[in-house]
Image (cartoon, rainbow, N blue to C red):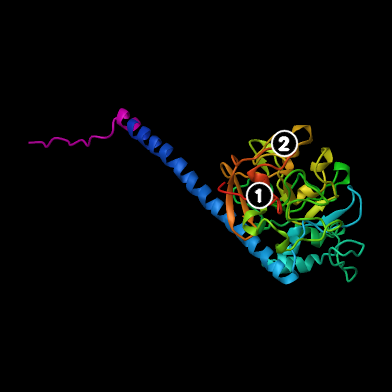
Amino acid sequence: MVPRARFERGFTLVELLVVIAIIGVLIALLLPAVQQAREAARRMQCTNNLKQIGIAMHNFHDTYGKLVPMSTEDWGNENTHGNWGWAVDLMPFLELGNTYDALNPTYGNNKNDFWPYQPGGGKNRLHNAVNNANLLAIMQKEVDAFMCPSTAGPVLNESKPIPYDSGNGDKYLARSDYIVVNDADNIDRRDCDGPFVWTRYDAPLTFAGITDGLSNTLFVGERCYTLGGELIGSGVVYGHAGNNEGGGAGAVTTGFFYVAGSGLLPINSTTGGSDNDHRQGFASNHPGGVNFVLGDGSVRFVPETIDHNTNNAANSTFEYLLQRNDGRPVGDY
């Protein structure tokens, strides 16, 4: 008797399509969870970056008896001159001492009482350093300590040339996603109400000068490169071109907005009128808000929904946190 052939039954087309559909549903369910987990990890790294910056600021204060300034003055015009920024002074306290030593920065060309003048000895001004191929190469390397992993943007800040050269500048330096707090309104070169000053006009503050208390004052926050398709512009690690302050079109072409921010407009604002004033504010690619380090070194996530009035008076929670000496108690936020 001839044995019958045995046939293994396979999947039908309908069954295969059902299995594929089920796998697709599972992937669709899992993908948001994976993305959220990745963002949580990126936000944690950003928090750690800011924590290290806060510690570095405390170590700087312990060493020099003052806060690091927003930037150190150098005489010159908007087109040709640059100013070293706060991040350069912090480098020896962020395990970046070799970079600081290589740059060998000097500050200003006139001695004043607000910051030690360091002439001669081969020291470099920023606008001269960018014309030195070796120093430019150093300043064009990404610096992880000043980059938020959630921010998608170029390593070089292509929106902020140094020098500015009437908008034709072609020297771009490493992007920074962290900027210091200068003022609750427009960025101000003189008598600002935030913790970080420009040394031509104001002496750097001490912790004692933060009369609202270090735990009630924001020191450093985020600014991402783009948000919702709009250029926000991040900052620059090494400093800024020119000396423009807030207010008017010049505020976001050259000047202090390269390294500092203000509370003129709400967190994560993508519209600032014809002057693009939102580019001097704070923004991030974390959903719903921005990480800040406070004066005591703690890091807080400040939601974009925080109480914030954008009228001419400082009368809201966000403004009180940006100011160093308003005397207003701040509750939960």
In the rendered image, which quarter is residue 69 located in? bottom right
- Whether residue 222 is visible, yes or no, is no
Q: What secondary structure is found at the residue carrying circle 2?
A: loop
Q: Which residue is mark 1?
A: 328
Q: Where is residue 139? Give x, y as percent.
A: 76, 58
Give the labeled residue for mark 2: 311
Amino acid, disc 1:
Arg
The magenta-colored residue range is 1-17
The secondary structure making up most of the magenta span is loop
Question: Which one is nearer the viewer's eye here, 99 or 44?
Answer: 44
Any part of residue 167 in sight: yes
Judge whether 318 appears above or below 195 on screen: above
On the rendered structure, is 115 left or right of 226? right
Identify whether 89 is placed above or below 217. Answer: below
Q: Which image quarter holds the N terminus?
A: top left
Residue 324 image-quadrant placement: bottom right
Q: Is residue 242 in the magenta section?
A: no
